Image (tube, grey):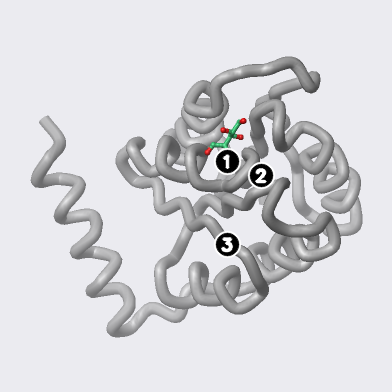
Amino acid sequence: MKLAIGCDHAGYELKNEIIQYLKNFDGVEVEDHGTYSGDSVDYPDLALKVAEAVAFGDAERGIVICGTGIGISIAANKVPGIRAANCHDQYTAQMCREHNNANILAFGSRVITAQTAKELVKTFLETDFAGGRHQRRVDKITGIEQKYSK
Ligand code: RB5
């Protein structure tokens, strides 16, 4: 699976740690969209890179990291086709896949520990969408997107 990853300055160190951690997963190819230092940047710019990689099919899924996970997930969700979930624990990481078919995992470097972040990543990668009634609901999300897209 090709996985796009990106962060702002607040997520820079955690992103590096997650990239190292992802080497434990067979078949996961990581595409690092930056940022590449701890210098201040604007999280929407990095969210857009990862979200476009996923929306255009260059990557199957993505991970975005900022201080809280809030700004970068809001920005990623503006790209049609993106369902970015800001998660804080294993349960939300599992549900975002099973119920919401999230294609981008977001989290905050100032909110969760690196250990928790690794657990979220593992769960996000290993959990399948449940489909069924959840497909209908995800289709309704797409419907909202289409209503407001020109
Ligand atoms: C940067 O200081 C911070 O605002 C950003 O990383 C993020 O938390 C925004 O939602």
Contact (Cβ within 8 Å) of mark 1 with mark 2: yes
Is disc 2 surrounded by few (<14), some (14 to 19) or many (20+) residues within 10 Å? some
Q: Position of residue 123 (x, y in %)?
A: 68, 70
Identify the image quadrant of the C terminus: top left
User: CA gap, disc 1 to disc 3?
Assistant: 20 Å
Residue type marked 1: Ala
Please tell me which of labels 2 and 3 falls first in the chain: 2
| Circle 2 or circle 3, nearest the eye | 3
Visible residue check, residue 26: no
Please report whichever mark, 1 or 3, sits nearer to the chain's N-terminal start: 1
Point 80% across, 42% down: residue: 14
Type of the residue with mark 2? Lys
Residue 77: give x, y in percent of width and height. 38, 43
Mark 3 element type: loop
Classify 59 as above or below 25: above
Q: Secondary structure at mark 2?
A: strand
10 Å neighbourhood of mark 3: few (<14), some, or many (≥20)?
many
Residue where numbered disc 2 is placed: 2
The spot of residue 114 in percent (x, y) is: 83, 55
- Some atom of ligand 1 lies within 8 Å of the CB belonging to the residue at label 2: no
Find ligand 1 in the image and state its quadrant.
Answer: top right
Q: How far separated are the C-alphas under marks 2 and 3?
A: 21 Å
Q: Residue at x 55, y 21 (%)?
A: 42
Among the two numbered marks 1 and 2 on one chain, the one whose residue lies closer to the N terminus: 2
Which amino acid, by three-letter code, is at mark 3?
Answer: Cys
Residue that mark 3 sits on: 87
Q: Which of the labelled discs sits on residue 59, or is there none?
A: 1
Q: Residue at x 15, y 55 (%)?
A: 143
Say if 14 sits above or below 118 in the image: above
Label for residue 33?
none
